[in-house]
Amino acid sequence: MKNFFKGIIAGIGGVAPGLSGSVFLVILGLYQKTINAIGTLFKNFKENIKFLIPLFLGFGVGAILFSKVVDFLLNNFEMYTRFAFLGLVLGTIPLFYREVKKEGFQKKYYIFIVVAAIFGLVLFTFNKNLFPVITDPNLLQSVLLGIAVAGSSIIPGVDSAVILSSLGLYELYVSSLADFNLTVLIPAGVGLVIGALIISFIMNKLIKRFYTGTFSIIFGLFLSIIPSVLNESCVIGLNFQTFLSFVFLILGFALSFFLGDIEGNVNKIKKIKNNISTLVKNSNDKKDATKE
């Protein structure tokens, strides 16, 4: 159940602009285990399936349910929604950076981060909508949708929304999930499986042999997608709309940061509550003693 709920969180990241499900898997501590399970699926099939099924079920539930919410919010409250997403993205930065440095970090890796960030800015920000928007896909385009979702979901820092928008597939992705359009989702599912197996195998090899270098590049790509979260609808001025947008940004940051170490943060909250309860109890005991 714990992996199922973590999968829901990852699924939410999969449809939110500026985020990706794999980023949440990284900060939830499940990314390497997930990649290894997919990349070596048939070597230890029973154990891998036991781990992956609840995670993927949760991912599917999160993506399907939240796609309706995203679709509604972007259509009716776009500026507030995008600032909230920006907060979610910014809240993952310190947690993601901690993962990059987990297995040793040298100054040379800053070069990897900067180069990857510049490359990502050119690719994701300055070359948006490389292909026309696809609304009535053929079979091959539906399969391509699944492969693109697999790649952008598996590689942390590569935003599904940005990649799919560049390929003209984002609107199709969100609407197909929201409407549960099986004529698109079934072939997309086939593409998703094929893409997931191949890309996970490659990523698993890279992480095992070049952990810090691989994650440094991924972190740079992640940083490069941040400007793309806001668009022309997000006009900042001295008004209530801007104030409320920044409130949502702060709330998004706090939520993201909390989810990054959800178990640790829950334990901290429990300790604080226990300390408060102890203080109240001691205070009441002193009052009773005084009365006596």
Image (spheres, rainbow, N blue to C red):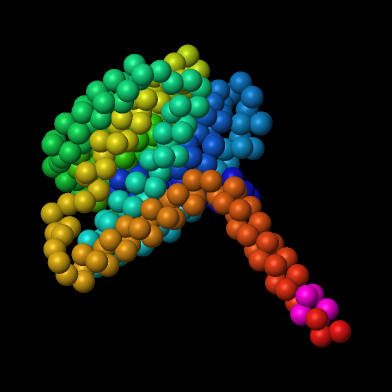
Residue 177 image offset from top left, x and y in percent = 36, 53
Is 170 colored magenta in this rendering? no
Comparing 238 with 217, the one in front is 238
Comparing 136 with 19, the one in front is 19
User: What residue sits 69% from the left and 62% below the top?
Assistant: 274
- Does residue 20 lie above or below 273 as drawn? above
Residue located farthest toward the right when viewing the structure as drawn: 292
**Helix, strand or loop for the magenta stretch, by majority:** helix
Q: Is residue 190 left or right of residue 232?
A: right
The answer, for residue 164, to whether it is visible in the render is: no
User: What residue sits 70% from the left and 67% below the top?
Assistant: 279
Residue 219 image offset from top left, x and y in percent = 35, 31
User: What residue sits 32% from the left and 23% below the top?
Assistant: 110
- Does residue 127 lie above or below 43 as drawn? below
Q: Is residue 228 left or right of residue 218?
A: left
Residue 186 image offset from top left, x and y in percent = 40, 44
Q: Which residues are magenta?
A: 285-289
User: What residue sits 53% from the left and 46% below the top?
Assistant: 261
Residue located farthest toward the top when viewing the structure as drawn: 209
Q: How many marks?
A: 0
Please state, as top left, top right, bottom left or bottom right, where the C terminus lies in the image: bottom right
Residue 142 image offset from top left, x and y in percent = 30, 40
Q: Quadrant of residue 111?
A: top left
The answer, for residue 245, to whether it is visible in the render is: yes
Residue located farthest toward the bottom when viewing the structure as drawn: 291
Is 288 colored magenta in this rendering? yes
Comparing 142 with 150, the one in front is 150
Q: Quadrant of residue 239?
A: bottom left
